[in-house]
Image (tube, rainbow, N blue to C red):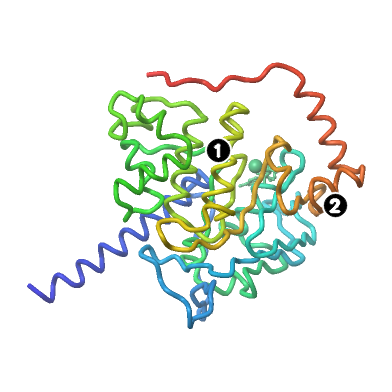
Amino acid sequence: IFQLSLPLNFLGTIYREINQNLLDMEVLFKLREDNPPIKDSPNAKPLMLSPPSTSVTTKNGVSPASNGTSITFENISFSYNPSRPIFNNLSFHIPAGSKAAFVGPSGCGKSTILRLLFRFYTPTSGRILLNDQDISQVQVESLRKNIGIVPQDTPLFHADIMHNIRYGNLEARDEEVVEAAKKANVHDAIMRLPESYKTKVGERGLMISGGEKQRLAVARVMLKDPAIIGFDEATSALDPQTEASLMKNINSTLLGDSSSDVSEGKPRSRKTAIFIAHRLRTIANADVIFVLRDGSVVEQGTHEELLRKEGVYARMWAQQANAEGGGEEEEESITA
Ligand code: ADP
Ligand code: MG
C-alpha cells in the first residue's frame, strides 16, 4: 500500500503539469492540431535563471529570477508559410528587468514574437537567448514555466471564476486567487456577480465582458508569477480609465517596481516584460520601444527619443493623438 501511494502522487504531479501547459498553449494560441509539439533536444537542460548557488525552487517550480532575465533575438528569420516571410534577420535586446514594447501595423508579427519566445514555433534561423541560454537548448517545459502571457483574447473554461484564475497556479490557495484578482482590478466586478467567485463562466456559463476576461487573464498571470511576462494587447478592451488603473497595478505589483518591492515579506525581483499595444499611450513609459516594419526593427528608443527622431513612431503617435479627439468607448457590461 505504501509503495503504491508514491507513484500515484507522482502521477498526480505529472498530470497537473501537463494540464498546466496544455492550458497555457490553449489560452495563448487557441489551436491544438495546427502545429506539432516541439520536442526537447537530447541534451536539453532546465532553464536556469539564477546562479545554482542561490537558486531556490519555489512552490510551483518557477526559478526565482533574482537578477532578472534579459531577452535577445539574434538574426531571427521566420515564416509560417515560405511564400510569406514574417521576420528577416530580426534582432533586438531587452535588458534584464526592463519593460519593452513592440509597436507596428497589424499583421507585422508582434504576436509572433511571443509565440517564438514561448517556443510554439521554431525560427528558421537565428537564436533566442534568455540571459546567455539559447532557448532551443533548454527543456521546453521549464521555459514555459518561466514565461506568462496575457493573450489578445482569453478563452474562459466552463468552470467557476475561482478555477479560471487558479489555472495560473493550480496550487494557489483561495486567498491568493482573491489577492491576484484585486491586483488585476477585477475583484469588485467578481463580487457583483450572482455567485461571486463561484459563478460559472465560459461556454454555457455567464457571459462576461471582454474587459473582464482580460483582467481575469492578468490575474492568472499574477498567480503564475513568472520571470518574463508578455502582454499582448492585454488592455485593449478596457475603457481608458480602467486601463490606466490596471497599467499602474501591473507596473507596481507584477513588475516589482518601487514601493511594492517587498510583497508578503519576500523581496521581489523586477520581471522582464514585453508589452504589445495598439494604443501607444499605454506604452509611452516603457524602457525601450521597438518599432517593427517589414520583418525587422526600424526604430528603437524611449518614447521621448523616438518623438525627437520624427520618424515612423512620431508619425504613429501624431496620428493616434488626432484620432483620440473623439468620444471614449465604453466597456461592455456583464450580460447574463
Ligand atoms: P500581429 O500580432 O503583429 O498583428 P501576428 O504575429 O499575429 O501579427 O501575425 C503575423 C502574420 O502572420 C499575419 O499576417 C498573420 O496573418 C500571419 N499568421 C499568424 N499566425 C499564422 C499561422 N498560424 N499560420 C499562417 N499565418 C499566420
Ligand atoms: Mg497580434
Which residue type does callout 2 highlight?
Val
Considering every residue shown, the one lying at the far left of the view is 1
The quadrant of the rendering that contains the N terminus is: bottom left
Q: Quadrant of residue 201?
A: top left
Element carrying mark 1: helix
Q: Quadrant of residue 203?
A: top left
> Relative to residue 197, is residue 223 depicted above or below?
below
> Relative to residue 177, is residue 201 depicted above or below?
above
> Relative to residue 115, is residue 245 depicted above or below?
above
Kindly identify the residue that appears in the image at 85 percent across and 52 percent down. 298
First of labels 1, 2 by sequence position? 1
Residue 328's tag is none
Residue 298's tag is 2
What percent of the width, then of the height, locates residue 104? 76, 43
Number of labelled discs?
2
Considering every residue shown, the one lying at the far top of the view is 327
Residue identified by numbered label 1? 246
Which residue type does callout 1 highlight?
Leu
Element carrying mark 2: strand
Q: Nearer the viewer, mark 1 or mark 2?
A: 1
| Left-right relation of 13 to 187 | left
Q: Who is closer to the viewer here, 79 or 110?
A: 110
